[in-house]
Amino acid sequence: MNMQSKESRKGFFKKFPGQFWLVVMFEFFERGAFYGMMSFLSQYFVDSLHFPKENVGIIKGVIQPLLYFLPILAGAIADRFGYRKILMAAFALLGGGYFLTSQMTSYTAVFAALVIMGFGAGTFKPIISGTIAKITDESNSTQAFGVYYWSINMGAFLFPLILVPILKSINPQYVIIASAVFTAAMIIPTAFFFKEPAKQKEVEARANKREQTGLLQTLANAFEIIYSPIVLLYNLMKKSAAWKIIISLVLVLLLGYSVYSYLDRSPASAKFPTIGIEKENTTLLFSVQRNMLKKAPYELKSTSPVTLTIYKPQHINNDVMAKLLRELAEYPGLAAVTENEINDYIKQSSGKIEISCELAPTASTDISIESLPGNRYKVFLKSLDNYISYKESLLKKLHETPTLRGITINDCDTLYQGLKGRSFFPFFVVSLVLLGLLIVAVSSGRGRKIEDKLAQGVTTMGFRLTTMLVPVVIIAAWFIPGVDTLGKIIVSVIYLSAMSLFIIDKSDSRKFVDHGKFLLMIVLYSGFWVLYFQMYDSVLWYVQAYVDAGPLNHAVNGFLGIFGVKSNWFFDVEHVTAIAAGTIILLQLFVSNIVKDKKAMPTMITGIGFATVGMAIFAISAHIWVFIAGVVIFSIGEMTAHPKFISYFGLTAPADKKALYMGYIFLYGVFGSSVGSVLGARLYVHFVDNLNQPRTLWLVFSMIGVITIISLLVYNKFLAPRKGKNS
């Protein structure tokens, strides 16, 4: 039996070439370095470098899009110039970016260093998955991507759990330096051991392609997938006058709606659970913020009035309560505050002060406050421009009213987000589609390169006007009111990318049908990732406000007590991620072995089904063991669905575009995180904060999982891409 086990292990390792284990090692160290740094980066920025929290948010808001969008370009460049060169460049950018981050102290310098790191991480992603796709086949692809996914979670689990606490206790900078060392060191095995994964015929084809395809054409080709819906829409309009009329009418209606959505800024309101305790000559402003992610269960500030904020009501046990009462007794007049009063206020704190906020011109100042009957206040802001620079003034103005002194910077941010009103996004999307259709119309059928167009004397008025229009649109984007600088940069870059439609070869309509199916599959699969990203937002808020972790805390501390260890361990929000990662580490290889010979789509749907059930389990009870069961079952679904998803496209992608396609699959993170974060927050506020119906929230998310399953079944029936297509 023992010999059989050894042979089985030997056979498993022999299934994959040495190149596979090399790139798995790369993935382990790269993800370990990334998650190791990210596990404490926000704290480091605020505590050590003293950056404002909103500025930290801006940094992360730039880095995340880089990580998800750069794989599209990096994949195309890797397919064109070779994986080995681009992989070495990625590790150089990673190591250099991490090291510079550890050494810089100014906001601008740190920002720039992290952008360098982001370029490295975004470049790295498609090369590893593209390499695995090239060196595996249908017999071992599922297991290969299972091991790949296991290595990601192992790195994300071990580095923050073991290495980060040790290095952070010595010097926080050492954590980031360690990330630099681990990633830069990978240049050595890349240089000496990594080989191009392409077969010899593909290498020769790429060499011939180099003579004809320059860098500009390569970058343009990278966008042909994402702009394929526009080409397909144009081809549909060309089919008949009826389609032209229908599509034009729809676009006009969407344009009108998008303009209305952007211009309509209806008043928004935000409720803050803030109440005051009057004791003799001292006022204690008491606030329960149930959605704040802080390690300490409460915060007591010696301001005037004294402010107490409870971040984790479920952690106010007898010991914590006694400590809190001792701290309150240090303030004149607050020694008489009792445990019952605190508990009563926690229970009653459901929103006592209502603040509505509007954009309105004022006579003498940018900020004014109007008191209304019923303990309500209306705040007027002259504009949203430069909000970050004057939010401190807004806070001071609010604090001039005694009953509003419990309002925090976070509350001001909530007002600001509400004031932003309806999104600019619909108008941006419609304008991009219209611009793309115009470019396709004037460039369709006139050759694939700009040089060809000029050589053919393409000097029509439409061509000249369109090439002039794009720069005008980009410049106009900088005068869009209500959009911050980062948003204007992103909008400008995307408008600029639309110029690739001038260069892309649009003669092969079947190619764009395949691209469109590929994109649709990613969008549908993103429904699962809408659920996944709740683990970083709404699930954590739910844990803080509702989950009773007492039985688990008692069990863990009791178990440690058997060995004579006195512990006051308690379950906290960061342990949710640890449970998920630990489940994947323990079971990923086992699950991958079970599904290795199963068809891709049924396996993915089964995994999403498990995740949906896991989400529904949250609706059963807020008991800690029920919650853990939900997280574990959700994680089993994740480890079943996602490696198979990656394997699925690794097998169906064109042979000469593996890295490009594997770069595009990361769009699931863009759709899932953007939609999931916004939708999760809004649903949580509606069903939990306002209606106190957490069970309904989880049932709604479960329905999203069911809809995702149904849509994938329909896709598999009618639109599944042709396996092994070569173009």
Image: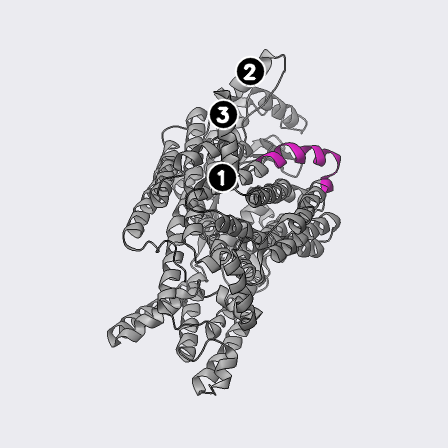
**What is the CA distance from the residue labelled 2 to the residue labelled 3?**
33 Å
Residue 320 image-quadrant placement: top right
Give whichever of discs 2 and 3 has the lower sequence position: 3
Crowding near pointer 3: few (<14 within 10 Å), some, many (20+)? few
- Going from N to C along the chain, the mark reached first, 1 or 2, is 1
In this rendering, the answer to whether 485 lies above or below 17 is: below
In whole angstroms, how far apart are the C-alphas of marks 3 and 1?
A: 15 Å
**Residue drawn at x 35%, y 72% as measured from the top left:** 234
Amino acid on which disc 2 is placed = Phe
Counting from the top left corner in percent of width and height, residue 379 is at: 52, 54
Q: Which type of secondary structure does the marked residue at label 3 adopt?
A: helix
Residue 161 forms part of the magenta stretch: yes
* Helix, strand or loop status at disc 2: helix
Q: Residues within 10 Å of mark 1 (few under 14, many from 20)?
A: some
Query: Which range is magenta?
Result: 157-174
Q: Main secondary structure of the magenta part?
A: helix
Of the residues shown, which amino acid type is indicated by label 1? Answer: Lys
Q: Comparing marks 2 and 3, which lies closer to the viewer?
A: 3
User: What residue sits right under mark 2 in the picture?
Assistant: 559
Q: Which residue is mark 3?
A: 5
User: For residue 15, which numbered disc appears in the image?
Assistant: 1
Q: Amino acid at mark 3?
A: Ser
